[in-house]
Amino acid sequence: MRGYEDNTAFLGEWGPFQQTVFFLLCASTIPNGFSAFSIIFLGDSPPHHCFIPDSGNLSEAWRKAIIPIEVVNGQEEESKCSRYRLDVVRNLSALGYIPGLDVNLTGVEQECCVDGWSYSKDIYQSTIVTEFDLVCNDKWKQPFTSSVYFLGVLCGSFFSGQLSDRFGRKPVLFVTMAVQTLFTFVQVFSQSWEMFSVLFFIVGLGQISNYVAAFVLGTEILTATVRVLYVTLGVCLFFAFGYMMLPLLAFFIRDWRSLLLVMSVPGLVYIPLWWFIPESPRWLLSQGRGEEAEAILRDAARRNRVTAPEVIFEESEGEEKPKPEEHHSPLDLLKTSNIRKMTLILALVWFTLSMGYFAISLNTSRLHGDPYVNCFISAAIEVPAYVISWLFLRYLPRRISASASMLLGGGALYFIQLVPPSLPSLSIALEMLGKFGMAIGTALMYAYTGELYPTVIRNTALGSCAMISRVGSILAPYIMTLSTYYKYLPYILLGSLLVLSAMAIPLLPESFGHPLPETIKQMHKQECGLWRSGNAFSGVMNHASPSGSPTDESGFGGCQENATNPNA
């Protein structure tokens, strides 16, 4: 029997049907760009110091001097978490003493901010930090809020892949889009940091789930060059557009509740898309629902104004048919030696890329300059990255392009420690170059992973890889805090992991120019064919038999069988 893409070739590649699916699925990823980085502005900490209650017996000189001066990174600044004891200062002020002249301030007792804090409103009207006082003893809650969100993303990655492979790509896509929209709106009414964090967890759960479902749905419906365009300049570029719109919205809406309210509105626009986005025919076929798959393809033919054949999917005698009652789980990704080794390598790569990407992205508020401009530049750098990733996917083998992009990112981060302190702009440029390389690698790995695994476990594989990557993103908010021990430690750590990942990628099978496998058995056959053709993976994944021919240790017997049976 011919493959799926041969059977559906009558549709063409870029008719009205494919165009509709392409742009609607791409548009569904725009809100993901909002929520993934919203914490940059929702949870930023403006300059602050202890609040000083109004008091008629406190002179102006003592009001200015009541906040101690501390030296931080070689610079003097006002203390954020302490003040001189208010009752002592009031007595000294009442006696007419002048601070620094009549009184040596180093001898005055200090106290914590018992009356709360005063926050600067030069940049923000309010954030969750100013609302819930996430400073000083509660400062740990700032990065932990981001980690809670990514913990939700991790859980969403784990469950959504299995749900999507079992119940379909389309239902999971729309249900999780509704979850993301609804709980973003409910966050507006948060009365405590704990309530905000719980809701933020659920938002993260929906965010990754609809992104992965949209990615897989488009990958399975679109074919050939259009599929490559979709996984790079499609979902990734529209995600970047949403990311770039975030600082623009935040610049004009500087209250965190109002910003969340505006971010929740776009989700309502996607409700009518249910009637325009179809289910994946590939998935329907894998579930034994051939009639539904044919109905979708005949409707697509009508919209493309082409004639569908009388029988779209011809059955051949002895062909392996998908079993609708057969379900797959993440354990299938570790079931055999070959798949297990491939999965472990992909786990390292996804973990590294996610941790580095989010660590650099969330660090924009700490860079010199305006936080809105810094965030926009950090988002805009992804546009050329995705254009290059599209060119790589179209013209270069996957292993070469993915490995080179991560070497670029790792090398740029390593070089930061060689930049003299007098050139901070060069350090920022190298940091953005490092993110540029990681953005290319991230786009490539989504496509590469989707091509390596068969239809029956593709969404589970992508969801599981995304889940592993979110372990990295959970740690990302804390990576830059390592600079308190050694200034360049975060960049050395990230650079080392990127170089290690770049060295591991050549051990994966090459998928460039090969059709998507439909079943696990086809996946093994394809891998064996690649090994016989001199794939670098053969030296790692197989042992040589006494006769010198490759053998399969996976338990499928596919390599040995195919090596002797040209018709297999």
Image (cartoon, rainbow, N blue to C red):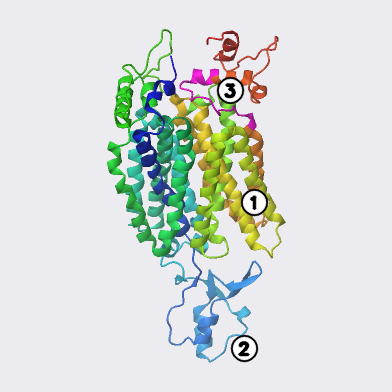
Residue 229: where, in percent of width, then height? 47, 38
**What element does badge 3 sit on?**
helix
Q: Is residue 472 magenta?
A: no
Farthest bottom residue in view: 96
Relative to 411, is 398 on the left or the right?
Answer: left
Q: Amino acid at mark 2?
A: Leu
Magenta highlight range: 506-525
Label 3 CA crowd tier, 10 Å (few <14, some 14–19, many 20+) = many
Q: Is residue 517 magenta?
A: yes
Q: Looking at the picture, tell me which residue is in the foreground, 266 or 311.
A: 311
Q: Earlier in the sequence, mark 3 or mark 2?
A: 2
> For the residues marked 3 and 2, what is the alpha-carbon distance in whole angstroms?
77 Å
Look at label 3 and name its amino acid: Asn
Crowd around label 1: few <14 · some 14–19 · many ≥20 (10 Å): many
Report which residue position mark 3 lands on: 338
CB within 8 Å, label 1 to label 3:
no
- Please determine whether, in this image, residue 431 is positioned above or below residue 273: below
Q: Vertical placement of 75 versus 279: above or below? A: below
**Helix, strand or loop for disc 1:** helix
Q: Is residue 214 left or right of residue 357?
A: left
The quarter of the picture where the N terminus appears is top left
In this rendering, the answer to whether 92 lies above or below 425 is below
The amino acid type, in three-letter code, at marker 1 is Tyr
Identify residue for label 1. Answer: 491
Q: Which residue position holds label 2?
A: 101
**Within the image, what quadrant is residue 252 found in?**
bottom left
- Which of marks 3 and 1 precedes in the sequence? 3
